[in-house]
Image (cartoon, rainbow, N blue to C red):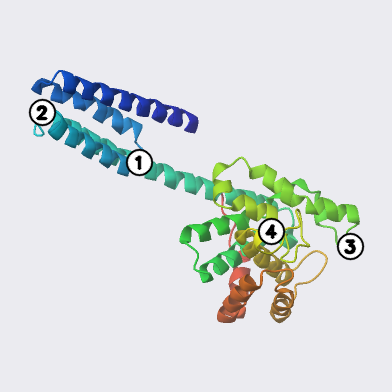
């Protein structure tokens, strides 16, 4: 569907410029008042060519109106044909914008529903990590808000939090739920989840542009370069992945796991402070500590309340 729309838009764009060139030539070499109506044709084609871009629509209508009035000596700006042409162009522009907005809203809604469904399918595999993805998403969202990042970026990091561990679908359930220490091979298998997750969703174009792929692939990198999968360090780790790393580790510490009970809030905060600058980005860690100081234990309780809600049917 999208490829067809792209091809259609390209064809109409080429046709628009060809028709406009032809009409201008006719007006130049065969000036006559009757030919003013010929601008109707490129104006209508412009509506189809630039249906996604309101500013371009307005510019095209304005330029053609000026050409009709000033360039064509016999063109009449108030000609009924020109008035109809302008009206059709503006109408097409409005319809195009409204259609684009509907497409955008629907696409965003579908992406969110798909993301929730994938996150729920992962969390449902293990009751000990149930709601982990949503917890991480909420913590990361709060950090982004505190950093005063744009609302769109905050939304993206929330989606990245929901999907950050999606690659664990490709890891053995026995390994994920093992209550004792992992062998080296088992640990290496779990480390593959970032690459598996990346490969699962890398073909979704918007995920590359909005940083979700970076969050999935790099949320286990460490600020000191001792993480995985690539051993990136410091600022070379994408910022959104550095935010997610803090949120992920904090929720891991304060949640019950199959191999241990949850740690209390004071201990988790102490670990964040001790590992700022080594495991975690120090600036982002300080920002999250500030969020925790503002919210206090209530933040944990609010996150825990999520578990009492029914699972949404997506």
Q: Which residue is mark 3?
A: 181
Labels 4 and 3: the sequence-earlier one:
3
Q: Which residue occupies 85% across, 58% down?
A: 178
Q: Nearer the viewer, mark 4 or mark 3?
A: 4
* Quarter occupied by residue 160: bottom right
* Place of residue 189 in the rendered image (x, y in percent of width and height, measured from the top left): 83, 50
Which residue position holds label 1?
53
Residue at (69% x, 60% y) in the render? 130
> Which dot, 4 or 2, sits closer to the camera?
2
Separation of marks 1 and 3 at Cα, in angstroms: 57 Å
Extreme-top residue of the structure: 30
Q: Are marks 4 and 3 in contact (CB under 8 Å)?
A: no
In the structure shown, which secondary structural element does the residue marked by tag 1 occupy?
A: loop
Position of residue 145 in the picture relative to residue 194 (left or right):
left
Count neighbours of disc 4 (C-alpha within 10 A) and say few if under 14, some if 14 to 19, many if 20 or more.
many
Residue occupying image coordinates x 29% and y 39%: 57
Give the mark nearest the N terminus, 4 or 2: 2
Mark drawn on residue 73: 2
User: Circle 3 sits in a helix, a strand or a loop, which is it?
Assistant: loop
For residue 214, above or below residue 253: above
Q: Secondary structure at mark 4?
A: loop
Give the foreground label among 1 and 2. 2
Point out the tag, 4 or 1, that comes first from the N-terminus: 1
Q: CA distance from mark 1 to mark 2?
A: 31 Å
Left of 77 or right of it: where is 120?
right
Which quarter of the picture shows residue 29? top left
1 or 3: tag closer to the N-terminus: 1
Instruction: Find residue 188 and report its horizontal and vertical position in percent.
Output: 84, 53
Question: How many angstroms separate mark 4 from mark 3 (CA)?
Answer: 22 Å
Label annotation for residue 219: 4
């Amino acid at each position: 569907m999208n490829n067809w729309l792209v091809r259609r838009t390209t064809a109409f764009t080429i046709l628009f410029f060809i028709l406009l060139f032809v009409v201008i030539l006719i007006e130049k070499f065969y000036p006559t008042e009757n030919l003013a109506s010929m601008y109707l044709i490129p104006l209508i084609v412009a509506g189809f060519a630039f249906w996604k871009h309101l500013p371009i629509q307005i510019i095209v209508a304005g330029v053609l109106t000026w050409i009709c009035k000033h360039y064509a000596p016999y063109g009449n700006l108030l000609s009924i044909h020109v008035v109809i042409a302008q009206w059709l162009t503006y109408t097409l522009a409005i319809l195009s914008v409204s259609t684009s907005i509907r497409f955008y809203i629907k696409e965003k809604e579908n992406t969110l529903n798909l993301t929730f469904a994938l996150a729920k399918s992962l969390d449902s595999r293990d009751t000990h990590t149930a709601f982990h993805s949503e917890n991480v998403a909420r913590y990361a969202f709060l950090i982004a808000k505190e950093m005063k990042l744009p609302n769109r970026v905050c939304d993206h990091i929330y989606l990245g939090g929901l999907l950050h561990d999606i690659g664990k679908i490709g890891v053995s359930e026995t390994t994920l739920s093992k209550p004792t220490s992992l062998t080296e091979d088992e640990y290496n298998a779990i480390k593959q989840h970032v690459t598996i997750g990346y490969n699962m969703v890398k073909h979704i174009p918007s995920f590359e542009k909005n940083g979700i792929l970076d969050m999935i692939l790099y949320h286990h990198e460490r600020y000191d370069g001792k993480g995985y999968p690539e051993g990136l360090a410091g600022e070379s780790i994408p910022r959104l992945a550095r935010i997610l790393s803090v949120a992920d580790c904090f929720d891991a510490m304060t949640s019950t796991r199959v191999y241990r009970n949850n740690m209390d809030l004071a201990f988790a905060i102490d670990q964040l402070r001790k590992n700022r600058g080594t495991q975690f980005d120090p600036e982002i860690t300080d920002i999250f500590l500030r969020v925790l100081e503002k919210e206090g234990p209530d933040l944990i309780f609010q996150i825990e309340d999520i578990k009492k809600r029914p699972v949404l049917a997506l």
